[in-house]
Amino acid sequence: MGVAITALVAAMVSYQFGASLAKHLFPIVGAEGATAYRLGLSALMLLLWRRPWRSWPAKKDWRVLWGYGLAIGAMNFVFYMSLRTIPLGIAVALEFTGPLTLALTHSRRLVDFVWTGLVIVGLALLLPVHHLDKPLDPVGVAFALAAGVGWALYIILGRRAGAAWGSSAVSWGIAIGALVTLPIGFAHAGAAMLSLDLLPYAIGVAVLSSALPYSLEMLAMTRMSTRTFSVLLSLEPAIAAIAGFTLLSERLGPLQWLAIAAIVAAAAGTALSARPASNDEPLPIG
């Protein structure tokens, strides 16, 4: 369990700092182009590095692999679209409704509801409902909530894809996601996508936001229960807020820092009290 938790935390840190870096690409290639960079380059890296075609499973479940890949593509696209108009920390807080729903549906003990309730309090404090003079952009909110649906599907299908395809599921899944987002990126940004000046930023986004965190998350999600994985992801809004403050100058108020403390406490409590359930065991890598 310790290895899985470490891998998941490292994945979240990498993901959020990659998202902060990607936001700097928006003025040039848009959210569409940044998504295409992210998945296209990370797919190329993983395919060349892992060479997943060398080890094909005896029984190939193509439907779950394509579902996993399409979930990756859609989740990344709508999340980056939300970042155009709402802060990173708020976008991740809204996106977290997906994993939070999974955590609620897999709760079985009273203490599980205590940790989940603490997460809900933290998320409520993160949302700027007290700033009525600066309402959130409804389109950005809708995109962030849609990303939450994609995130939940990513968790469910990722565990199944990992069980069926082993470690190669990540490489193939990101490649499928790239097939969806590359045409959208080039249609929006055109020749700007081929600028060599943007390549270092694009590579950084690909490594930090996809290639590294998805590999680490696959390691984690196949070694812990769905409930534990989902609630541990409550660290994500806190990490996003810190990344937004550090790299994007998105400042937090006292209530938002209190929200971070509540979410971190919930994540720590979940990790300490986690125990496998009989019908929610981690899925082994093949």
Image: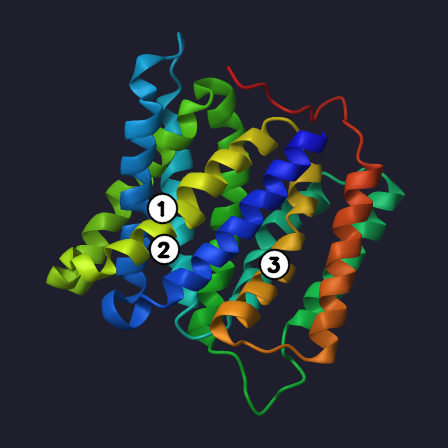
**Location of mark 1 (residue):** 73
Q: Amino acid at mark 1?
A: Gly
Q: Secondary structure at mark 2?
A: helix
Q: Give the mark nearer the N terminus: 1 vs 3.
A: 1
The numbered mark at residue 239 is: 3
Neighbor class of circle 1 (other Cα within 10 Å; few <14, some 14-19, many 20+) is: many
Q: Position of residue 33 (x, y in %)?
A: 26, 59
Secondary structure type for disc 3: helix
Kindly check if marks 2 and 3 are in contact, taking CB atoms under 8 A apart as contact. Answer: no
Instruction: Give the spatial CA distance, label 2 vs label 1.
Output: 6 Å
x and y percent of residue 8 in the render?
60, 40
Q: Mark 1 or 3, which is nearer the eye?
A: 3
Dot 3: within a 10 Å radius of its alpha carbon, few (fewer than 14), some, or many (20 or more) residues?
many
- Image location (x, y in percent) of residue 153: 50, 41
- 162 over 100 or under it: above or below: above
Work out whether residue 89 or residue 3 is closer to the camera in this orientation and state it: 3
